Image: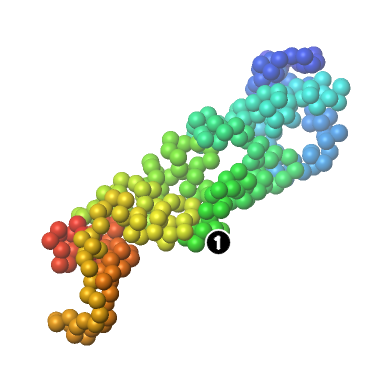
């Protein structure tokens, strides 16, 4: 069947009609009335640059070459006659129709299935907020992480704290952890935060005979991923972090020896002590003794609790 030839002006028609016409054009039911050559007669710079873009290369080498400028911008006859930008659809804006729906009509793979429920969509971030179509070889406005930092300034600040993931050093990227187009979980890999962390920190995964319950439940109980003033991306310095769950060791309340002392069984350890010596020793860092904080398979030495002391 010969395609219908559409020759009416779309000035004054609603967004629904325009969407339907775009569907007809892309499926071949209706023939485009304004050719690409008509568009580039005015938009010549865009036309020349478009050929080298990702969209231009794809459209030029596949059966999608039949698509025209009208496939994304809608019927262009009224715009060409009146040269009024209001009479043509601009998918980068939200004044005429939802530009995201235009993009998703082609970008329909499983990667975009959850876009409607994504944090970016909920925050009214459109495809055009990050991506470009005309005039750039790259399909994103900036490379990550700089593109992400345009909105996530607090994450940028965290990434320069003393302890941070090596994003600034270029060893990992925001997209290594985050699924910007939405997904079943907040992050891109695995079925939860823990599984994502284990893709790099496999030695912390276990399973262990003696587990540290918070580490087995969720890494984010103790760690903050973007940056911290505490070592190892901890939310707080030791021992404050540990004391959120654990009671203080009784040793910390014992008054120390005041003055010089010599241990009977270890005279080489002779020294000078103060009444607060025990407190200083037991309130420095828990991991000085409890080194296997993520879990262990080995019994603890000199501990009546087996391996629950997580000291080896």
Give the residue displayed 25% in from the left and 69% down from the top. 278
Q: Is residue 252 left or right of residue 229?
A: left
- The residue to which callout 1 is attached is 169
Q: Is residue 249 left or right of residue 154?
A: left
Q: Quadrant of residue 260?
A: bottom left
Q: Is residue 108 above or below residue 287?
A: above
- In this view of the protein, can residue 291 be seen by the observer? no
Quadrant showing the C terminus: bottom left
Q: Is residue 102 above or below residue 291?
A: above
Q: Nearer the viewer, residue 264 or 110?
A: 264
Quadrant showing the N terminus: top right
Give the residue displayed 86% in from the left and 34% down from the top. 42
Residue 232 on image: x %, y % = 41, 60
Give the residue displayed 39% in from the left and 45% down from the top. 193
Q: Is residue 159 left or right of residue 210?
A: right
Residue 168 on image: x %, y % = 56, 58
- In this view of the protein, can residue 187 be seen by the observer? yes
Residue at the left extreme of this rendering: 304
Q: Nearer the viewer, residue 263 or 193?
A: 263
Q: Is residue 248 left or right of residue 301?
A: right
Q: Quadrant of residue 206?
A: bottom left
Q: Is residue 300 above or below residue 17?
A: below
Number of callouts: 1
Residue at disc 1, secondary structure: loop
Residue 190 on image: x %, y % = 39, 44
Q: Is residue 163 above or below residue 94?
A: below
Q: Quadrant of residue 263?
A: bottom left
Give the residue displayed 83% in from the left and 36% down from the top. 43
Q: Nearer the viewer, residue 93 or 29?
A: 93
Residue 138 on image: x %, y % = 67, 47
């Amino acid at each position: 069947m010969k395609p219908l030839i559409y020759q009416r002006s779309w000035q004054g028609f609603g967004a629904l009609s325009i969407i339907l016409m775009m569907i007809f054009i892309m499926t071949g039911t209706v023939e485009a009335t304004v050719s690409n050559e008509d568009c580039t007669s005015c938009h010549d710079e865009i036309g020349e640059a478009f050929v080298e873009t990702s969209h231009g290369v794809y459209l030029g080498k596949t059966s999608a070459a039949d698509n025209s400028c009208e496939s994304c911008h809608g019927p262009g006859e009224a715009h060409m006659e009146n040269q009024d930008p209001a009479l043509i659809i601009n998918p980068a804006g939200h004044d005429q129709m939802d530009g995201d729906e235009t993009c998703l009509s082609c970008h329909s793979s499983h990667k975009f299935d959850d876009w409607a429920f994504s944090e970016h969509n909920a925050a009214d971030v459109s495809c055009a907020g990050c991506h470009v179509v005309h005039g750039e070889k790259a399909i994103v406005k900036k490379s990550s992480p700089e593109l992400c930092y345009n909105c996530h300034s607090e994450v940028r600040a965290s990434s320069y704290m003393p302890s941070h993931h090596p994003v600034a050093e270029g060893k990992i990227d925001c997209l290594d952890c985050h699924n910007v187009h939405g997904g079943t979980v907040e992050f891109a890999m695995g079925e939860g935060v823990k599984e994502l962390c284990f893709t790099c920190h496999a030695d912390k995964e276990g399973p262990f005979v003696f587990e540290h319950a918070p580490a087995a439940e969720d890494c984010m109980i103790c760690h903050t991923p973007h940056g911290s003033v505490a070592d190892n991306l901890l939310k707080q310095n030791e021992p404050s972090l540990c004391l959120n769950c654990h009671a203080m060791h009784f040793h910390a309340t014992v008054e120390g020896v005041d003055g010089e002392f010599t241990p009977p069984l270890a005279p080489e350890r002779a020294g000078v002590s103060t009444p607060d010596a025990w407190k200083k020793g037991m309130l420095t860092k828990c991991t000085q003794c409890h080194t296997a904080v993520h879990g262990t398979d080995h019994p603890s030495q000199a501990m009546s609790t087996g391996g629950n002391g997580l000291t080896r």
